[in-house]
Image (cartoon, grey):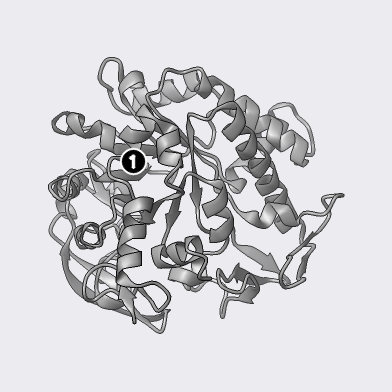
Amino acid sequence: MISTLGMAARRYETHKLTQEQLDAMIKKHSLANIFKAWAEDPERVRSCGAQLAIHRLLFDWSRGIPDNSTQAGAALLEAGLSCGERDISITQDRKFIAAHPMSTGRFLLGESFTIAATPLMRLIGKKLVIQQVSDGQFTGKSHSTDEAIESYDTQLRHALMGPPGYNEIVDARNSDGGDFIVYAWKNLQSQLTQILIQTYPYSLKTYDDFATYVLNLYPMPTGWQKSFNMAACVTAETLLMMARTIAAKSQSPIADTSVRNLEGILENYYAPWMRQPWKMFAANLGISDAGNWLSADEQSAKHPESGHVFKNPDIIETIKAIKAINNYNNRLRTEHPHVMRIAMARTPDFFEDGKPFFFSMVTGKPAAWAEKGTEERYLTDAAAGIPYALKNADLVMTDDPIGCLEIIAGEV
């Protein structure tokens, strides 16, 4: 029997779970009102196991459903899932559209605008274009879809009119690619308990720095610190950036990127946030099991399944940062159990001898990408490290919900 997830055209299929099993697991691992429930009783949510948030919504390029789109949101809701992540970008006139890249070249045929330098009305209504996919690979060809660009608040209205209990993680980008907390429209304030706003404060070291930054971006309602659900994200790359920034400010020629020091930077970064009266606070730590491969002297890393040994300094730096994040993540669960820990079910891009690698979720082995610079992160191939994230995080953002549910069920 083949069980399917989502609309009739969906590609996600499983031979290992019956439709009844799949439906029951979706209900358990995609609770309605996840963030509101967490704010009231974290342990009750945690007792249901890892919750799934579908990265860029339930898109399917091969079937004409663009990522971050109204159609992808409808597919997610139809599948019975309740939590999605959507990328949004700010326009020149400070409006928002759903889009991951900072320019329109990937999703508008023959038109390439920098979103931050383009007014909303120049984009609204244009038909989205997606890359054609064959056997999980981009073909280099594009075709138009029936989906038109909408403002983000219009898209969110569509989602909130669906089944009750919808949750959304908003990944918002400003003009330089840094991510920030977005302004909550007055007519959506009643839905704040269902929306988690995610921010990547690359250069902000304290809560006060962040608050000043936000207030300068957009006037926020009185008392917004108490009414917003917040997520602070630190990936391996941003943690290393912090270490280098600290070294530069102290005029040190070399940044201390030992696991111990990186973990200390995380502690200093998160400490001010922990003192705030959030109804809910989430730490998006980009968890990956790669940190456990690090040798005792921090000079190399051996993949446990394949035996592949990484020695490239850039790779080792990244793996050290992952190890520090894992250590701090474990402490979070003990010292701050109210913090929801979010993981992205992907690993950083690894390069060895000039060749990029990803790690297969199924085999756990490194596989070389066909050509550096091509976009071949597609579904399962991009979703490395999911088993570790499912075990060590409270909410997992993933492009492969079926793979996650099969792992939870012990079928992989």
The reply to whether residue 325 is visible in this rendering is yes
> Which residue is painted at 34% across and 44% down in the image?
169
- Depth check, front residue: 341 or 354: 341
Q: Amino acid at mark 1?
A: Ile
How many C-alpha atoms fall within 10 Å of the one at disc 1: few (<14), some, or many (≥20)? Answer: many
Secondary structure state at the residue bearing disc 1:
helix
Among the 4 quarters of the image, the one containing residue 334: top right
Q: Point out residue 124 in the picture as x, y percentages from the top left corner.
A: 15, 54
How many labels sit on residues?
A: 1
The residue beneath circle 1 is 34
Residue 322 pos. (x, y %):
66, 48
Tell me the residue at 29%/38% (across/down): 195
Q: Quadrant of the N terminus?
A: bottom left
Q: Is residue 402 above or below residue 340?
A: below
Q: Is residue 356 above or below residue 90?
A: below
| Residue 70 percent across, percent down from the top left | 19, 58
Q: Nearer the viewer, residue 30 or 297?
A: 30
Residue extending furthest right?
A: 297
Residue 256 seen in this snapshot? no
Q: Is residue 308 left or right of residue 221?
A: right
- Left or right: 41 with respect to 263? left
Please provide percent x and percent y for residue 176: 43, 44
Q: Where is 23 relative to 324, above or below?
A: below
Q: Along the horizontal axis of the image, is 390 left or right of 83?
A: right
Q: Which quadrant of the view contains residue 198?
A: top left
At 77% across and 56% down in the image, what residue appears?
A: 313
Q: Residue at x 30, y 62 (%)?
A: 23
